[in-house]
Image (cartoon, helix red, strand yellow):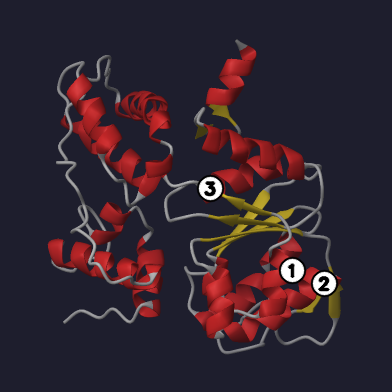
């Protein structure tokens, strides 16, 4: 029974027993006890941060907090200060010294989410820290030494970004020592009943409700949906369903129909498909980027991440 529980509810809320998830568990356990940097790959909403937390919680650095930095959440002129810190007076508005994430994470683990969005001009400085554990704060000439394990995550094809000149090949090689790919939800549909049970109980408890029954037609709809937003979208759909349910039976408010038009015969890049789908969702929400019933909520993204993707894909409100 303990083995079965371990397969179904393992590692920091990563729920599943499919072969695809077992493969992720196996790689997490294989690499966690080392100091090797890890690159977590996967579509938006697949649970890349949960994988990073699982690696950290099984590592020798687990007694220190996991330090997180979202490279898409800040404008490029602030990312350097956030990562490496600054001295008082280093730039306008720097009224006091500030430690960067690398100093805070000294002796621990730094999770760099959305690493594919890191500006090209900052990549050499990150490469130097990875290679030598050295950097300088903004406004200082003193070199600081740190011992930081890096776990990076991205939903981008970094190899393609290297070919386009958007990402340094030497940084890519340093990060890609041990990649872990988190499968999209559509490739692990056998995990959906477990995930539904887990999220419904969690959400119902938080909302003070009791959901005891999930109709077969609801479960069929959940398992047959394509889930472009993956687990984050599933959780959002289930939360709306729990809110909409007045009795013990789960009632979905969302109509889970095929989200995509049939694909054209000519092949397109993933970036082109992503751009089209974001535009479709923005049009459906009257270009409401953040907040309730917004494009960010439907896509399962943080508002700042969606805005970063819009800038990257050259999406502007007409």
> Can residue 62 be seen by looking at this rendering?
no
Q: Name the residue that disc number 1 marks.
A: 174
* Vertical arrangement, residue 226 with respect to residue 301, above or below: above
Rendered position, 309 above or below 186: below
Residue at 60 percent of width and 10 percent of height: 1
Q: Residue at x 52, y 27 (%)?
A: 17
- Using the image as rendered, state which of residue 240 and residue 42 is in the foreground: 42
Q: Is residue 194 left or right of residue 26?
A: left
Q: Nearer the viewer, residue 143 or 97?
A: 143
In the image, residue 51 above or below residue 310: above
Q: Position of residue 195 (x, y in %)?
A: 40, 30
Q: Nearer the viewer, mark 1 or mark 2?
A: 1
- Answer whether labels 1 and 2 touch (C-beta < 8 Å): yes
**Label 1 vs 2, first from the N-terminus:** 2
Residue shown at 22% from the left, 67% from the top: 264
Instruction: Determine crowd level at label 2: few under 14, some 14-19, many 20+ residues with C-alpha closer than 10 A.
Output: few
- Of the 4 image quadrants, the one containing the C terminus is bottom left
Left or right placement of residue 31 versus residue 200 in this view: right
Does label 3 or label 2 sit earlier along the sequence? 2
Residue neighbourhood size for the residue with mark 3, other residues' Cα within 10 Å, grouped as few (<14), some (14–19), many (≥20): many
Residue under numbered circle 3: 182
Where's residue 250, x and y in %?
21, 24
Which residue is labeled 2 in the image?
Answer: 131
């Amino acid at each position: 029974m303990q083995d079965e529980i371990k397969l179904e509810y393992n590692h920091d809320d990563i729920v599943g027993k499919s072969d695809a998830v077992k493969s992720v568990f196996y790689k997490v356990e294989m690499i966690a006890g080392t100091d090797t940097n890890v690159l977590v790959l996967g579509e938006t909403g697949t649970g890349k941060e949960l994988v990073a937390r699982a690696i950290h919680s099984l590592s020798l650095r687990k007694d220190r907090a996991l330090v997180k930095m979202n490279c898409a959440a800040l404008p490029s002129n602030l990312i350097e200060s956030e990562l490496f810190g600054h001295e008082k007076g280093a730039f306008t508005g720097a009224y006091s010294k500030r430690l960067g994430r690398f100093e805070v994470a000294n002796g621990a683990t730094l999770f760099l989410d959305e690493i594919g969005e890191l500006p090209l001009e900052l990549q050499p400085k990150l490469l130097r820290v990875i290679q030598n554990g050295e950097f300088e704060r903004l406004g200082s000439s003193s070199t600081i030494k740190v011992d930081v394990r890096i776990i990076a995550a991205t939903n981008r094809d970094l190899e393609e970004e290297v070919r386009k000149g958007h990402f340094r090949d030497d940084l890519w090689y340093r990060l890609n020592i041990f990649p872990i790919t988190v499968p999209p939800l559509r490739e692990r549909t056998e995990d959906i009943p477990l995930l539904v049970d887990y999220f419904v109980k969690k959400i119902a408890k938080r909302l003070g409700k009791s959901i005891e029954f999930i109709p077969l037609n609801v479960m069929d709809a959940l398992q047959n949906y394509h889930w472009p937003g993956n687990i984050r979208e599933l959780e959002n759909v289930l939360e709306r369903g729990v809110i909409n349910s007045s009795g013990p039976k789960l009632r979905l408010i969302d109509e889970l129909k095929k989200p995509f038009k049939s694909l054209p015969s000519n092949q397109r890049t993933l970036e082109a498909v992503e751009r089209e789908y974001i535009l479709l969702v923005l049009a459906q929400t009257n270009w409401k980027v953040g907040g309730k019933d917004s494009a960010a909520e439907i896509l399962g993204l943080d508002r700042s991440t969606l805005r970063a993707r819009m800038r990257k894909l050259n999406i502007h409100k007409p």
